[in-house]
Image (cartoon, rainbow, N blue to C red):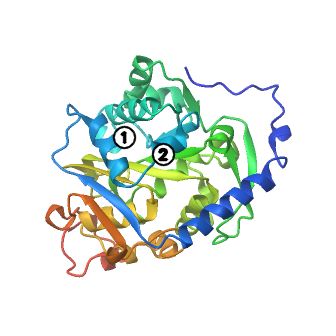
């Protein structure tokens, strides 16, 4: 089911040629965000993996002013989080039913849907699909998998320029997508405090060029590279799996936390800021959100239009590691764990 890399394929033939076009598109994305100061974020509560998630996702996107006509006949790439799947820790990765539901929504709107991921810690993508349960879910939907770690790549200019990397290599499926849908799991992160829609796009970076766990990005600054990747990918929206979540030593070693939420939005920065508030984290203390504020989207609550449920009554503090670089994420200094 996975796309096996073709050793005889001339990957260099894919480089450079489309760089100017892709860079122009990425720059246009940054300009678009700067000229749209407010964004909608939809929250649905009391959600379960046995519920009508198709309806929830569809209603959420419509509530956020997403126009289905813009993707009819277009390529939509769903990007779940399969960082290091384990059957023993299903709260670590995007639930297969979330992916199936999103497929059904976008197929129903006439889009050409694919699912792709480049797991950051696992070289064997097929094993990641098996452990996460996503392989079986995709087979049920007759949906192929785009292996973003091993796919042919193209070079795209770094449109964000927050880090020192002048360009990124993106897999073909990302370059060719008319819409990339980030589908993260709602989790804490031992370096950033939290990981959400923006950080999930680390998985569009191919391991075949950047290695595992993609330390080139880490060495150039996690906040800076998260910002730059988001600035350089084309049109993006997000659907967040906030039903069974992870707190504590995330994004891999944490413990389960049930929230029963789904978040949807057409601006990843605004959705991540709302997710932080739900976790009782100050959004402007998250380094990559501070960088993205007013450049890729709003983090000010006054500029985020809440659709569906309000976040205030749903706020439920996530336990965060008791580390010096994380202690400023909350005003009261509570809910830290060793």
Image point (49%, 23%), residue name? 143
Q: Position of residue 210 (x, y in %)?
A: 66, 49
Q: Is residue 51 left or right of residue 218?
A: left
* Element at label 2: strand
* Disc with the residue nearer the chain's start (1 vs 2): 1
Q: Is residue 129 above or below residue 163?
A: above
Residue 93: percent from left, percent from top: 37, 41
Disc 1 and disc 2 in contact, CB within 8 angstroms: no
Mark 1 falls on what kind of element?
Answer: loop
Using the image as rendered, state which of residue 210 and residue 337 is in the foreground: 210
Q: Percent position (x, y) of residue 62?
A: 36, 48
Labelled disc at residue 151: none
212 left or right, relative to 55: right
The spot of residue 19 in percent (x, y) is: 79, 52
Question: 54 and 156: which one is in front?
Answer: 54
Q: CA distance from mark 1 to mark 2?
A: 13 Å
Disc 2 designates what residue? 181
Circle 1 residues within 10 Å: few <14, some 14–19, many ≥20: many
Which image quadrant for residue 187?
bottom left
Q: In the rendered image, is residue 142 in sight?
A: yes
Picture quadrant where residue 195 is located: bottom left
Relative vertical location of residue 305 with respect to residue 143 in this rendering, above or below: below
Which residue in the structure is indicated by mark 1? 94
Quadrant housing the N terminus: top right
Q: Residues within 10 Å of mark 2 (few under 14, many from 20)?
A: many
Quadrant holding the C terminus:
bottom left
In the image, 122: left or right of 4? left
Residue at 73% over, 53% down: 22
Between marks 1 and 2 in the image, the one whose residue lies nearer the viewer:
2
Q: In the figure, 155 relative to 145: above or below?
A: below
């Amino acid at each position: 089911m996975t796309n096996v890399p073709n050793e005889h394929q001339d990957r260099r033939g894919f480089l450079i040629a489309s760089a100017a076009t892709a860079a122009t598109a990425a720059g246009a994305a940054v300009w678009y965000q700067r000229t749209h100061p407010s964004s909608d974020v939809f929250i649905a509560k009391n959600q379960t993996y046995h519920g009508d998630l198709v309806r929830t996702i569809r209603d959420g996107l419509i509530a956020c002013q997403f126009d289905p006509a813009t993707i009819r006949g277009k390529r939509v790439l769903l990007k779940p989080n399969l960082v290091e799947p384990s059957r023993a820790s299903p709260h670590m990765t995007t639930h297969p039913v979330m992916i199936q539901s999103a497929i059904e929504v976008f197929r129903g709107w006439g889009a050409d849907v694919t699912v792709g991921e480049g797991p950051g810690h696992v070289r064997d993508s097929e094993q990641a699909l098996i452990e996460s349960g996503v392989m079986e879910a995709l087979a049920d939907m007759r949906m192929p998998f785009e292996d973003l770690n091993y796919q042919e790549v193209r070079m795209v200019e770094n449109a964000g320029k927050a880090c020192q990397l002048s360009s990124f290599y993106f897999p073909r499926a990302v370059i060719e997508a008319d819409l990339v849908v980030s589908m993260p799991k709602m989790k804490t992160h031992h370096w950033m405090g939290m990981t959400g829609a923006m950080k999930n796009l680390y998985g569009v970076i191919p391991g075949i060029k950047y290695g595992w766990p993609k330390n080139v990005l880490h060495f150039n600054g996690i906040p800076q590279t998260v910002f730059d990747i988001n600035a350089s990918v084309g049109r993006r929206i997000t659907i967040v799996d906030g039903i069974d979540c992870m707190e504590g030593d995330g994004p891999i070693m944490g413990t389960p936390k049930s929230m029963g939420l789904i978040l949807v939005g057409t601006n990843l920065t605004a959705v991540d800021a709302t997710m932080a508030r739900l976790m009782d984290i100050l959004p402007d203390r998250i380094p990559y959100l501070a960088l993205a504020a007013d450049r890729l989207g709003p983090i000010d609550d006054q500029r985020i239009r809440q659709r569906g449920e309000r976040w205030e009554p749903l706020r439920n503090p996530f336990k965060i590691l008791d580390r010096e670089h994380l202690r400023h994420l909350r005003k009261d200094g509570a809910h830290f764990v060793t």
